[in-house]
Image (cartoon, rainbow, N blue to C red):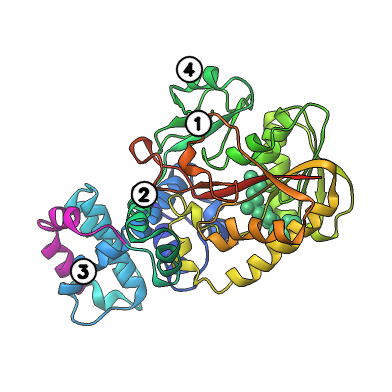
Amino acid sequence: MTKPQKPMSARRMALRLLDQVLEKRCLLSEVTQGPAWDAMAPQDRAAAQRLTLDVLRGLERADRLLKPHLRKAPPVSVQNVLRLAVVELCMGGAAHGVVNEAVTLVGSDQKTRHLKGLVNAVLRKLVDAAPAEWAILRVPRLPKWLRGPLVAAWGGEAVLAMEAAHFAGAPLDLTAKGDPQALAEATGGTLLPTGSVRLSAGGQVSALPGYDEGTFWVQDAAAALPARLLNAQPGETVLDMCAAPGGKTMQLAAAGASVTALDISEQRMARVRQNLSRTGLKAEIVTEDGLEHQGSYDAILLDAPCSATGTIRRHPDLPHAREGDEIGGLIALQAAMLDHAVQLLKPGGRMVFCTCSLIPDEGECQVEEALARHPELKVVAPNLPGVEPDWITPEGGVRLRPDYWSDTGGMDGFYMALLTKA
Ligand SMILES: C[S@@+](CC[C@H](N)C(=O)[O-])C[C@H]1O[C@@H](n2cnc3c(N)ncnc32)[C@H](O)[C@@H]1O
């Protein structure tokens, strides 16, 4: 009989995740699963995830602190041990424990054991001065593949502000199934002008009052706006054309609409089912390619697949795991889905097109081009509480950016437009 394996420690798992993101270019969501992950206690999984996110956000600073002490770059797995240790030291970790743990981690692998002395020496040199130096280094920059297009679209100053927002990370935003004021009071959160409830990050979501009863779900304040813009009415037939994991499906169902939640991915659809079951909300589930779907709806929400570059505050793995080469294909898919959604919409019906992208080709340009292809479409000016006049774009959509609301915790980058079909 094989002996059951001891669950991995949070640091060891964080290193494995960093290797997979930085070497194999996987997204964290693709690798935070599997037997080793499942075997860990929930608090260790949370700690591993937090350490990984901290290192990815601070990677540029960690490398700048390490560089003067490394004549030659060690193997990536050892670099990651050093990066993790530096980030922990600079974020207030106890020096003795952090250094010992790093040396132990390098020593436990036969291939890197010979580098224990180097790791010990480098970290001991950094222990005293690193935290103060860390604090004055520049805010980590986005990689070139993304920074270039963003500077072209929004200007250098705005991109610096976005990078500051990415580095700061994101608070925890909730959407209420019912009264948001009551949710804010029950959870001790702040009611935001757009109707979401904001809490500081770090708490255990499932321990919040009302979680088991399904009185809320986690959803960034920006991501909660497209469904509000669609303003589904009780009894209306609404298609959520890219539904998983279901944040917007739940909003539409909570509004009393008769919702069809469609997504191409069966695996992701499982999350929609879980979310609906926890919140006691109802939707018809269809697992299908949206481009093949047939039907006729009063309203459609098209939250199209995109580069997700608006979510880097919460997913700092994305700029490291991607290089932008998939964006051309995504833009073509978004346009095809928009065209198909127009066919599925009843005359007089309305549709929200949205993407969690910061790249105008996936937002503003899509709507401008759809208006040219479909003379029967018109943009309706948004009329939503909390939406500031500066956020409205020339073609009539809403542009949200991570550097907005900078004093109160920011928001994801998003684009959305409400369209009606004559
Ligand atoms: C941005 S996510 C949707 C997020 C979701 N609306 C929410 O609020 O929770 C995009 C989704 O599009 C789905 N998708 C990609 N291509 C699709 C297609 N051809 N038809 C339907 N869904 C598709 C992906 O599986 C993914 O779940």
Q: Is residue 258 magenta?
A: no
Name which of mark 1 and mark 4 comes first in the sequence. Answer: 4
Residue on which disc 1 sits: 386
Q: Is residue 120 magenta?
A: yes
Q: Farthest bottom residue?
A: 72
Q: Report the residue at 59% width, 19% height from top.
A: 179
> Dot 4: what SS?
helix
Residue on which disc 4 sits: 185
Q: Residues within 10 Å of mark 1 (few under 14, many from 20)?
A: few
> Dot 3: what SS?
helix
Name which of mark 4 and mark 2 comes first in the sequence. Answer: 2
Mark in front: 3 vs 1: 1
Q: How far is mark 4 from mark 2, CA to CA?
A: 27 Å
Residue type, mark 2 in image: Ala
Residue on which disc 3 sits: 66
- Say which of 375 and 147 sits in front: 375
Residue type, mark 3 in image: Leu
Q: Residues within 10 Å of mark 2 (few under 14, many from 20)?
A: many
